[in-house]
Image (spheres, helix red, strand yellow):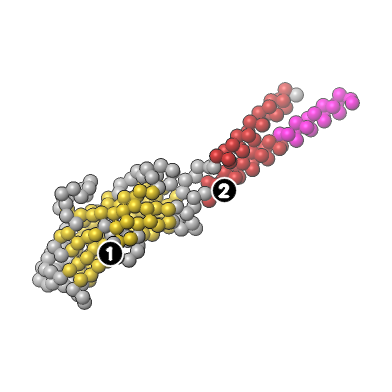
Amino acid sequence: MPVVQKHFSSEKHIMKQLWNGIRLTAIAAATMGIASSTAGAQIAFSGNTFGCFYSAATTPADCTGLMSTVGNLAYKGSTFSVASNPADGLVSIGGAPGTPNVNNLGSFTLNDGTYDYTGKRFALFVNFTNPAGVVGNNAYGAVVTGNLSNATTGNVFVDFVNTPNNFTFTDGTKLSFGVDDLSLDDNATGMATVAVTGHGYATPSTVPEPSSMALMATGLIGLVPLVRRRKNS
């Protein structure tokens, strides 16, 4: 075989191998992209809540020494286990009040009785137990409005700071979550119970699957000797 033809054949073989290595790497990269965008797209969240009224200027770190009742307004905590929407990442915790509370953020109950609630402060604590290893501010402050000092029935408004709190979990999941305001009206029955609700958006972890990482590594390693041979030739 003439030298030129032999060299051309060798060059062609190297190029073919090089192209196969590039194609393998591209497939691995695409697989990683798919995994990062869809793996764990529906995320399960579970946890519990507790809360208390306070009079300090700043939201307390916990409810030690504080009460969950003020006047005739009482708060009861809850447990929750919900999942995000796969399509948009929406996380909504808003089940109806119950005994016990489930899948909401707790509930307020207003009973007959004269009391001026205006200016009272309330702290709600939302504890996420799954996913694990959460980092973020789990306290939500609220101001109560409703002067019932001259009547046993009426309206009370619980105005939460609606700015979402941001949470990051050990597995890379992120959650931006806020609590909704609520109103109680015990005019008709003398007692009203309303659930505390909240919503936010979750972002799943973008860590690629190990198999995809191994596939891409194989493709990249395979390119090294080919590029070196081509350079030497």
Look at the image and say whether residue 189 sits in the magenta stretch: no
Q: Which residue is mark 1?
A: 99
Name the residue: 30% across, 65% down.
97
> What amino acid type should be assigned to the residue bearing mark 1?
Thr
Q: Is residue 168 visible?
A: no
Q: Is residue 135 placed above or below 47 in the rendered structure?
A: above
- What's drawn in magenta, residue-wise? 1-18
Among all residues in the image, which is located at the extreme right? 1
Q: Nearer the viewer, mark 2 or mark 1?
A: 1
**In the picture, residue 9 is in which quadrant?**
top right
Q: Which residue is mark 2?
A: 34
In the displayed structure image, the side of residue 58 where residue 170 appears, left or right:
right
Residue 85 position within the rendered picture, expressed as x and y whole percent measured from the top left: 46, 58
Q: Is residue 185 placed above or below 62 in the rendered structure?
A: below
Image quarter (top left, top right, bottom left or bottom right) of the C terminus: top right
Residue 78 position within the rendered picture, expressed as x and y whole percent measured from the top left: 29, 58
